[in-house]
Every structure is written in structure tokens, then in C-alpha cells.
Image: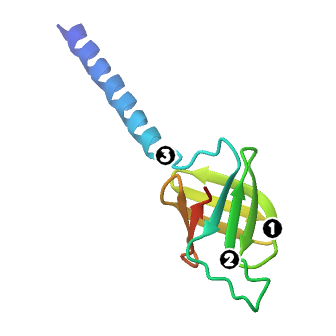
């Protein structure tokens, strides 16, 4: 009788551990997949016709982990990106940018709140 109780207890422990691991791995699932080059542009940006250098925000993500970012201007910075759950970080030699992934087609820059949408 004691061996059945130990076996049942062991079985319940294994099931609990598997359930917890499944739950935590599901929470960490990346919210954005990059299977080809994806270009995002600032939503609602109105370029100033007198300022040719005002291009708004732009972000290009490539499948090999390379990113090109234009943080509201005309200079493009080359860097790398990492996706962790709903967080996207872009690191260049100059600065690090953090984004929240809202969907497969929209991301939001965290510091300034700039919304970027996937180009069609």
C-alpha cells in the first residue's frame, strides 16, 4: 500500500512540474517572428516640407538579427535586435532602443511612445 502512495505522489509531482514548465514557456513566447525582412514606419508622421531631413521613425528587422533604425531623422543606424516575449530591443553602437510588441504589425517605442506599423 505504501508503494502505491509513493508512486502516486511521484506521478503527481512530475505532472505538476511539467505543467509549470509548459505555463512558463508559453508566457515567454515571442510575439513577433522575423522570417523575412520587415520594415516598420512611424504611424501618422507628417513630414515638414521645409525640412528634408524629417523622415520620421523607421525600423527594418532582418532574419539574421540585423536591424537598421532611423529615430526620427535621416540618419540610419545599423545594429542588432533581440526579441523576448513582447519586448524588442535594438542595440547600436550609439544607443539602445526598447519597443513593446503590440501585434505582428505594430510596435511602440517605449521612451517616446512612438507607434510604428509594418509597411505593406
Q: Which residue is mark 1?
A: 77
- Whether residues under marks 1 and 3 lie with C-beta atoms below 8 angstroms apart, the answer is no
Quadrant of residue 19 in the image? top left
x, y percent for residue 56: 68, 77
Could you tell which of marks 3 and 2 lies nearer the N-terminus?
Answer: 3
Mark 2 crowdedness (10 Å alpha carbons): few <14, some 14-19, many ≥20 = many
- Tell me where residue 53 sits by quadrant: bottom right
Quadrant of the snapshot with the N terminus: top left
Q: Mark 2 to mark 1: distance in Å? A: 14 Å
SS class of the residue under badge 3? loop
Q: Describe the colour scheme in one phrase.
A: rainbow
Residue for point 49% across, 46% down: 28
Q: What's the distance in space between the residues labelled 1 and 3, CA to CA?
A: 28 Å
Residue pictured at 61% horizontal, 51% vertical = 83
> Residue 36 appears at what percent x and percent y?
69, 44
Which residue does the image show at 56% across and 49% down from the upper left?
32
Q: Are marks 2 and 1 in contact (CB under 8 Å)?
A: no
Distance, label 3 to label 2, CA atoms, is: 31 Å
User: Which residue is labeled 2 in the image?
Assistant: 56
Structural crowding at the residue carrying mark 3, measured as other residues with C-alpha within 10 Å and reported as few (<14), some (14–19) or many (≥20)? few
Secondary structure at badge 2 equals: loop
Q: Could you say which disc has been placed on residue 28 in the image?
A: 3
Looking at this view, is 45 or 15 the one in front? Answer: 45
Find residue 119 and report its horizontal and vertical position in percent.
Answer: 62, 59
Q: Would residue 96 be found to the left or right of residue 107 on screen?
A: right
Amino acid at each position: 500500500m505504501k508503494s502505491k502512495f509513493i508512486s502516486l505522489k511521484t506521478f503527481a509531482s512530475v505532472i505538476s512540474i511539467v505543467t509549470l514548465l509548459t505555463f512558463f514557456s508559453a508566457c515567454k513566447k515571442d510575439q513577433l517572428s522575423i522570417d523575412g525582412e520587415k520594415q516598420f514606419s512611424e504611424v501618422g508622421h507628417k513630414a515638414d516640407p521645409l525640412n528634408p531631413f524629417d523622415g520620421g521613425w523607421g525600423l527594418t528587422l532582418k532574419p539574421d538579427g540585423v536591424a537598421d533604425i532611423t529615430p526620427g531623422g535621416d540618419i540610419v543606424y545599423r545594429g542588432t535586435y533581440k526579441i523576448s516575449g513582447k519586448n524588442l530591443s535594438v542595440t547600436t553602437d550609439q544607443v539602445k532602443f526598447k519597443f513593446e510588441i503590440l501585434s505582428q504589425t505594430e510596435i511602440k517605442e517605449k521612451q517616446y511612445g512612438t507607434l510604428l506599423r509594418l509597411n505593406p
